[in-house]
Amino acid sequence: MPQAIPPGWTQADNALTRTIARADFVEALALVLEIGKLAEAANHHPDIDIRYRTVHLSLSTHDAGHTVTAKDFALAQEINDLNEEAIRLTKDDLHRRFKACFFPPSS
């Protein structure tokens, strides 16, 4: 029996895809970092394209001939379930790091 496609995702060309718009570039980066944590934990890595504040995701199982498998459905759902608070904390951390890089404390 085929699995249900998680909300917000589409299945085409042997991949699950989703586009997510965020408030700005740093928030898009924060989202990608949170997705990266999930991907590493699952040892299953999406194709990710960031265009300013828009994140394009594509999931397929490369070692299964670039087809959609249960791994893809599971990771798509985990991405859907990401905690907005975690993304916000990561965004805040990125802002602090960027500020430190561009505006180091005076000696």
Image (cartoon, rainbow, N blue to C red):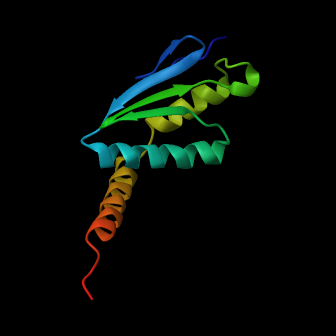
| Residue drawn at the location 65% of the way across and 37% of the way down | 44
| Residue plotted at (56% across, 10% down) | 13
x and y percentages locating residue 35 in the rendered image? 49, 43
Q: Please tell me in which quadrant of the rendered image residue 51 appears.
A: top left
Q: Is residue 68 above or below residue 81?
A: above
80 lies above or below 9: below
Q: Nearer the viewer, residue 8 or 93?
A: 93
Q: Residue furthest bottom?
A: 107
Q: Nearer the viewer, residue 104 or 97?
A: 104
| Quarter that holds the N terminus | top right
Number of labels in the image equals 0
* Residue at 45%, 21% in the rendered image: 9
Query: Can see residue 6?
Result: no
**On the image, which quarter does residue 14 sit in?**
top right
104 horizontally vs 63: left or right: left
78 or 87, nearer to the observer: 87
Where does residue 28 sit, x and y in percent of width and height?
35, 42
Q: Is residue 52 left or right of residue 30?
A: left
Q: Along the horizontal axis of the image, is 38 left or right of 80? A: right
Residue 26 in view here: yes
x and y percentages locating residue 2 in the rendered image: 63, 12
* 6 to 32, vertically: above or below: above
Q: Position of residue 68 (x, y in %)?
A: 64, 19
Q: Is residue 90 left or right of residue 65?
A: left
* Image quadrant where one finds the C terminus: bottom left
